[in-house]
Image: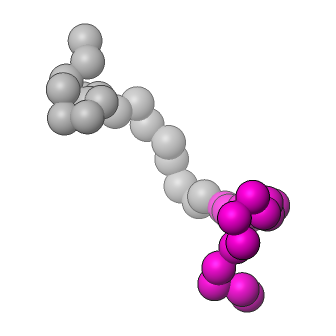
Amino acid sequence: WNGTLAPGASTTLGFNGTHGGTNTAPTTFTVNGTTCD
């Protein structure tokens, strides 16, 4: 749980997640606030 990295250092991150429920299609989609068609 080091809060800093030295210049030129690297680290590896991991992610674990779960989702329960439905995954319906979105009604709108935006990128940087601009609606996509």
Looking at the image, residue 9 lies above or below residue 28: below
Image quadrant where residue 35 sits: top left
Image quadrant where residue 36 sits: top left
Q: Nearer the viewer, residue 2 or 22?
A: 2
Residue 15 showing in the rendered view = yes
Q: Nearer the viewer, residue 16 or 11?
A: 11
Image quadrant where residue 17 sits: bottom right
Magenta extent: 1-18
- Percent from the top left, x then y, of residue 19? 60, 58
Count of marks placed on residues: 0
Secondary structure that dominates the magenta span = loop
Residue 14 showing in the rendered view = no
Looking at the image, residue 21 lies above or below residue 24: below
33 vs 17, left or right, is left
Query: For residue 4: magenta?
Result: yes
- Percent from the top left, x then y, of residue 34? 18, 26
Which residue of the protein is positioned furthest toward the front in this rendering?
7
